[in-house]
Image (cartoon, rainbow, N blue to C red):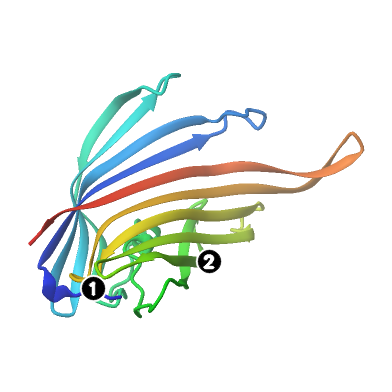
Amino acid sequence: MNWDFSNFNILTFSYKQITTNKTPLNQYDAAPLETYTELSGLLVVEVKDKNSADVTLKNAKITAFIKDSLGNRFDTRSQTIPDLVYLKGLKENGLVDEAYNKQTELFAKLLFPIINNSPADTCIIQIPLDTSFDIEGNLVEIKGKNTIDFASINAEYFKLKTHAYAERDHIDVGNGKLYKCKIEGESDFKFNTQKKYFTNGNIKLNMLLKQKNDKVYKQRNEKYNRTKTVVDVDVDITLKLIKVD
């Protein structure tokens, strides 16, 4: 299961990414305050030569919005953003020549889950997932795995389902506080086995960062460790192939 760059020059996908930032008003609130950001544009896979391609988000617009108690959406502000390179020097086997853009590293590693062999039957494959998380201005390495399940295989398409998971505890960035970070998500993709390219995909991801308190508190003669949620973000990405050149 590899790309075949000889089958196209440019693939154009519609791209939509909705980010939900959940902010606790205080540690006792059951329902956090939710704010939303939508990033929409065209994700373009452009072949540069027979051995490599670039993946770039183009014509993108970012929109902040809120929802009322009934779930109705109200846009608050929008702006266009410059083209953003997600992957530079992408090879047919899914590897990347250039270093990942730190701004898009995690998303780039979860986009287009290429497997470097073709399964004879339904199977599950695990790929290491190494990424970084910004904690108090420090980029901290987080390790885990992306598990890919060939949910359906036929002569025309592969249907893939993935589960990404990475976690790190007792993170010390030198400010006297300890943190715990977890990244977890699910995705599904469809891959054309004849043309050797993806036709659509959806990624749902949660990024969670908690600050731990080493002090032990007593309440009703029971001990417990108090933690505070610093980051709780959901990301939903939808891709759909709309043009092949």
The reply to whether the C-beta atoms of the residues labelled 2 and 1 are less than 8 Å apart is no
User: Against 101, is 135 above or below?
Assistant: above
Horizontal and vertical percent for residue 226? Answer: 73, 42
User: Against 38, is 201 above or below?
Assistant: below
Task: Give the amino acid type for the residue marked by disc 2 in the picture.
Answer: Gly
Residue furthest out toward the left = 245
Q: Which residue is mark 1?
A: 3
Residue furthest out toward the top = 69
User: Residue, x 39% and y 24% (percent of image)?
Assistant: 67
Q: Which residue is mark 2?
A: 144
Q: Where's the N terminus, which quadrant?
A: bottom left
Horizontal and vertical percent for residue 63? Answer: 28, 34
| Secondary structure category for the residue under label 2 | strand
Give the CA distance from mark 2 to mark 1: 25 Å
Task: Give the amino acid type for the residue marked by disc 1 in the picture.
Answer: Trp
Q: Nearer the viewer, residue 139 or 126?
A: 126
Decide if residue 201 is on the left or right side of residue 26. left
* Mark 2 or mark 1: whose residue is earlier in sequence: 1
| Secondary structure category for the residue under label 1 | loop
Q: Nearer the viewer, residue 101 or 240?
A: 240
User: Against 126, is 61 above or below?
Assistant: above
Q: Residues within 10 Å of mark 1 (few under 14, many from 20)?
A: many
